[in-house]
Amino acid sequence: MIELTAGFMPLTDSAILLAAKEKGFAEEEGITLELVRENSWANMRDRLAIGHFDIAHALAPMPLAANLGLTPFDTKLIAPMALGSGGNAITVSNSLYEAMSSKAQFSVSDAAAAGGALRLVVEQLKHGAKKTLHFAVVHPHSVHNYELRYWLAGCGIHPDADIEIVVLPPQLMADALAAGQIDGYCVGEPWNTIAVSRGVGKIATVKAAIWASSPEKVLAMRANWAAENEQTVTCLVRALYKASLWCADKANVSALCHILAKPEYLNQSADIIEPALTGSILNGASLNSGLAFFEPHAQAATFPWRSQALWIYSQMVRAGHVAHDSSNKQIVHDSFRPDIYRAALTPLGVAVPAANSKVEGGLLETTAVGVSAQSLFLGPDGFFDGTVFDPDKMDDYIAAQK
C-alpha cells in the first residue's frame, strides 16, 4: 500500500476526499490516506508547499497563486482534478438581511435581485455617512473572494470602496457575525447553515446562482511530486472519481452526513451538514435547470477545466493581484491538468470531456457534448449577469471589466 498524507479543511466540500478513505475507494487503488485537518487556508498552502502534505483539499486559485509567485514558497502546484462544483453561499447578518428585504424582494436563488437589494442598502449608508459594511472571505486567493467581488461589481457595488473585504478562517465567521464584527461573509458549508441555525444570520444567495456549475475546491499537489509519482496520481484520481459517484448517490446522503460529522472531520451534527447535500439550504427555492447547491459528480464536476482556471485568473487581474500578460496566462493554463485526469479515467470507460476548455457561461441549459467515451451532459454554466467568458478572447474580457 502507498501511504499519502492529505490535508483538508472542515468543510462539506471535502466530502469526496473523506469518502475515498472511509468507503475504501482509496484502499481499492492501493492507497492508504492519512487525513489531517487544518485550521486555515494559509497553513494548508504552506504545509503542502514544504512537504507536510502529499496532496491537499485546496482552494481552486491556490495552484494559480503559487505558480504566479504570489505565495511565500517557490513551489509549483498542479490540480489534476476538481472536488465538485458549487458549495458556497453569501450569508449576512439579520439586520442587514432585514434592511435588504425592506428595499427589494429577492430570493436565495436570484443573485441579481439579492445584489440589487444590497446595492440599495449600500447607497443609503453612503448617503447617510454611516459605517462601511464589512464582508469576510476565507483567503485573498480564493474563489470566495473573486466570486464575491464579481457579484458585488455586477450589481453596481464597488468591492473596495463600498464594501470592506476582510479575511477570516471559515470556522470563525459565524462567531464574527454574531459579535457584530462583520456584516456578511462568503464561505463554504456548513458555516452558512451554522449561522442560520444559531439565529445570527441569513443566506442572501449562493455560489451556484452567481456562476452555475463552477469550481470551488481542487485536488492540489506539488508538480515535481506528481511527475515522480505518476502511477500513484493515476490511482488517486481513480479513487476520488469513484468516491464522487458514491457521494452523488442520494441513497448515500445519510451515510455521508455521518462520515462528515465525525469529530476528526467537521465535528458538527449531521443535521447541520445535510442541507448542503440535499439542497435544502436554498429554503425551498430552486436553481436553473435543477442545479444542485453542491454537486460532487454530475456535469463533469470533477473535471479540471482550464477555462475555469483562466476565468479565476481574469478576476485575479481585476482585483489587482497579478498583472495580465501572455506569460502569466500560460502559467495559469498549465496549472490545471485535464490531461492527467483524462489519462487516468479514459481506460475505465469514464465519460470525459474531449476538450480542455470551453466558453464559460455559454450553456443556458443541460447539453450533451462530445466526449472521449460514452455520453456526457454539461451545464447550465451561466453567470448571473448574463456575460460569457471565452478564454480565446481573454484580452478583450479583461479590458471590458470594470
Image (cartoon, rainbow, N blue to C red):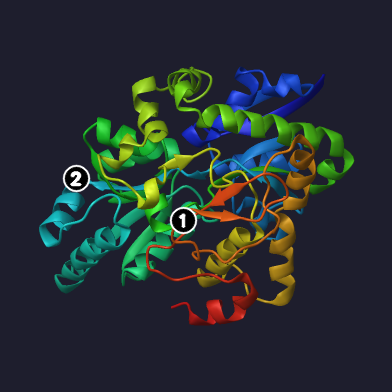
**Badge 1 amino acid:** Pro
Observer able to see residue 269: no
At x 13%, y 62%, the residue is: 103
Examine the image and state in which quarter residue 69 appears: bottom right
Q: Which residue is mark 2?
A: 94
**Along the line of sight, the residue nearer the viewer: 48 or 97:** 97
Observer able to see residue 359: yes
For label 1, count other residues whose C-alpha is less than 10 Å away and answer few (under 14), some (14-19) or many (20+). many
At x 14%, y 55%, the residue is: 101
Tag 2's secondary structure? Answer: helix
Q: Which residue is mark 1?
A: 380
Disc 2 + disc 1, Cβ < 8 Å: no
Examine the image and state in which quarter residue 345 appears: top right
**Badge 2 amino acid:** Asn
Tag 1's secondary structure? Answer: loop
Say whether residue 104 is left or right of residue 361: left
For label 2, count other residues whose C-alpha is less than 10 Å away and answer few (under 14), some (14-19) or many (20+). many
**Along the line of sight, the residue nearer the viewer: 8 or 311:** 311
Say whether residue 345 is left or right of residue 383: right
Lower position in the chain sequence, tag 2 or tag 1? 2
* Percent x, y of residue 18: 59, 26
Count of residue discs: 2
